[in-house]
Amino acid sequence: MCSGGCAKCLGSTLIPLAVLCTLANILLFFPGGKVPEESGHITDEVWCFGGILGSGVLMIFPALVFLGLQNNDCCGCCGNRSCGKRFAMFSSIIFAAVGVLGAGYCFILSAVALNKGPKCKYQEAWTYPFKAGDYLADHSLWEQCTSPENIVPWHLTLFSLLLVMSGIQAVLCGIQVVNGLFGTICGDCKCCGCCGGEGTV
């Protein structure tokens, strides 16, 4: 597989992950699956849009770039013509770095939110009743949140999904950084074999 084909595979994986992260972030605006009475009842980290901006919008750009690399005159790079393949692979490294930053942003926000716990009604006040992730190991503490119903598993499930998916996105973008370096230095010469040598003049 040429470096362009590898990039296309990575891009096709990043697109559904970006969509899922966006959906997970949107669902977090509805604690326990219900419309909140006030915006102040939503966990603060949700408003940072980690899944929508970091692993969503910022991930679409590198994904589209990766998808287009294989169709960027793959065979011309091995002949006397300059097709800009190596420059395209180099530019993909920059977009991959943007993807790593976006995924890292979502990953850090999700980790903080999981450690902090959800914002819920505790002793007639809306606050964060859990300390330093203590609720993760002790499920009996979940009863401290009297409203919204099922807010703790809702919070835990969605932010865990964001944590895992953003981690996968960061790894995939990291792979493209390495793949892009190989494509920049060595070109995409393996493609010429499958094109019947059309790249040589």
Image (tube, rainbow, N blue to C red):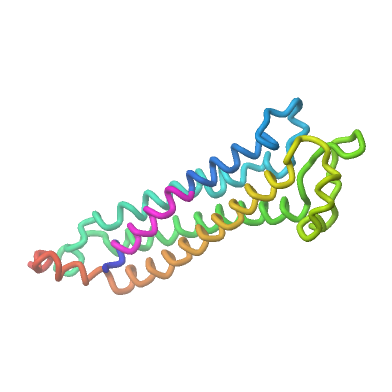
Residue 25 locus on image (x, y percent): 60, 42
Q: Quadrant of residue 125?
A: top right
Q: Bounds of the magenta span?
A: 5-17
Residue sitting farthest toward the right: 123
Residue 185 locus on image (x, y percent): 33, 73
Residue at image location 79% in from the left, 41% down from the top: 119
Q: How many marks?
A: 0
Relative horizontal placement of residue 105, taking residue 143 as reference (left or right): left
Q: Quadrant of residue 145?
A: top right
Residue at image location 29% in from the left, 74% down from the top: 186
Whether residue 28 appears in magenta in the rendering, the answer is: no
User: In the rendered view of the protein, which quadrant contains the N terminus?
Assistant: bottom left
User: In the rendered view of the protein, which quadrant contains the C terminus?
Assistant: bottom left
Pick the residue in front: 17 or 199: 17
Residue 135 locus on image (x, y percent): 80, 55
* 169 versus 158 height, above or below: below
Residue at image location 27% in from the left, 67% down from the top: 2
